Image (cartoon, grey):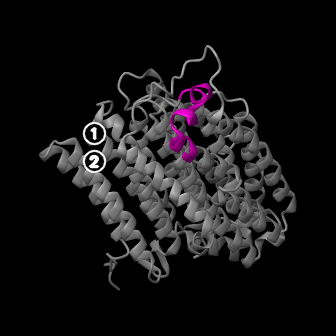
Amino acid sequence: MTGVQSVDSVALLPAYLAAGTAVLVLITDLLVARPRATVAVAALGALATAVGSALVGAGAERRTFCVGADCSWIFGGRAALVGAVVALLTLGVLGLSVPALRAGRSPVGEYCFLLACSMTGGVVLGAAGDLITLIVALEALTLPLYVLVGLRRGSLASAEAALTFFVVSVVATTLTLLGAALLYAVTGGLHLGRLGTLLAEQPELRDLPLTTAAVAVLLVGLAFKVAAVPFHAWAPATYDGAPLPVAAYLSTASKLGGLVALLVVVQRALPADQTGPVLALLAVLTMTVGNLVALRQRRTVRLLAWSSVAQAGYILAPLGALALAAGRTDEARSAAYAAAVAYAVFFVVLELAAFAGVTALRPTGADGGTLDDLRGAARRHPWRAAAFGLALVGLAGLPPGLAGLFAKVTVVRALLDGGAAWLALVVALNAVIGLAYYLRVTAALWAPNPVGIPNVGGAAAVPLVGVVAVVLAVATVAAVVLGVAPQLVLDLAGR
């Protein structure tokens, strides 16, 4: 028996492209020392990673780093979807960052390198087949963001946000590692498929107090990553203190990574009868608290941050159906997992469009400002405000934002199929609450500016940079296309 493993380099191609992008960015910044060249290399690398993920995922599922039937790298349709979406989000955030980078508010080489490193973690995360690979990938996605949040020169709020994010993430990582270690102590395995098989076939293991503790600690650690209530307090302060493009990345690619990690662990490794009730409770708390607190927000980014918390609750909701026997049938579980992934994809596209709209309506390098700063923006910048308004309406789940509408319908349908009608009702009630603040912001864009309140984000705003306009347009078009053809995402999410 040989200890040498064969390596499928085709399966690893998306990770090679993402990691290669980070290396090329460093080399370009060192040898060429031209900001435009550095940004161009990062952008082309992100685009190549998205294309590579799509091409590899178009074929049959590929596995590598295997020991028997257990593999640490599994690249199929869902991994391709996650890799492509993370890469495209990185490309979009890079475009939103161009005005601030031109203004010298952040070092270009370091900024692009850190963004590429985070993208690499997101790509690897989608294909992780064991807990070690998953946790390392999640940290590779998160670690660069500590620096990116605090990279805005001369900003005390940015430094405070970076410190908050760092401390909370260290706690979350510690808990996640402890949960993985306890699971290993109980089962002797780390591969997700093997863990699921052992816990399903040996009820005595599932009934051990140590197993219950392991599941609880692991879920809590991952709940921190997705800002699920009550492990959410870091998110609003971090988003508001970070530069706008970095806040956009935190709210999209980073959140998608945490949700995918939680979903993979729940789907393949942990017993559904133990995780279902916890996830149902987390979903109810997260969507309800997020929506209620968002109603009182006056700062734009804080409102989007609390909205992002609520949206995480909607994504977790289908998994709450696992609490019931009807939700644990093979068909119901598949529908729940597909609904969670699809909603996450719809959400991050709309969220990127929303942050692109805020960036387009604010002066270069400024923070998100207050809602009063956006009043009357449609009179001065009708196309920018229209795109921003479409993203907000989509997040609310109203037409013509069909992507958000189909996302919520998909979640409700999955809950009804799983016998969790009560949870579907909670989702519907929270969607109604969410309408209040989404429509309030949308209406403010067309409202007249009150006397005595300056047009901070209006007449003072600099002309829209071409790259930001492209990101805003592409994100808006993508949201419209996904709303017209949602089944494509559902099919990929179900693979």
- Residue 172 appears in which quarter of the rendering? top right
- Give the spatial CA distance, label 1 vs label 2: 7 Å
Residue depicted at x 73% and y 40%? 291
| Residue placed under numbered mark 1 in the picture | 108
Instruction: Look at label 1 and name its amino acid.
Output: Val
The numbered mark at residue 169 is none
Using residue 391 as the reference point, say whether residue 202 is left or right of it.
right
Q: Secondary structure at mark 2?
A: helix
Q: Residue 285: where, in percent of width, then height?
A: 76, 45
Q: Is residue 20 magenta?
A: no
Q: Would you place residue 336 above or below residue 238 in this image?
A: below
| Residue 138 or residue 492, whichever sits in front | 492
- Residue 210 appears in which quarter of the rendering? bottom right
Q: Would you place residue 290 above or below residue 60 in this image?
A: above
| Residue 275 or residue 68, whichever sits in front | 275
Instruction: Look at label 2 and name its amino acid.
Output: Val
Q: Residue 372: where, in percent of width, then height?
A: 61, 25
Start-end of magenta stretch: 369-387
Q: Would you place residue 177 above or below residue 84 in this image?
A: above
Q: Residue 67: where, in percent of width, then height?
A: 44, 78
Q: Is residue 374 magenta?
A: yes
Number of callouts: 2
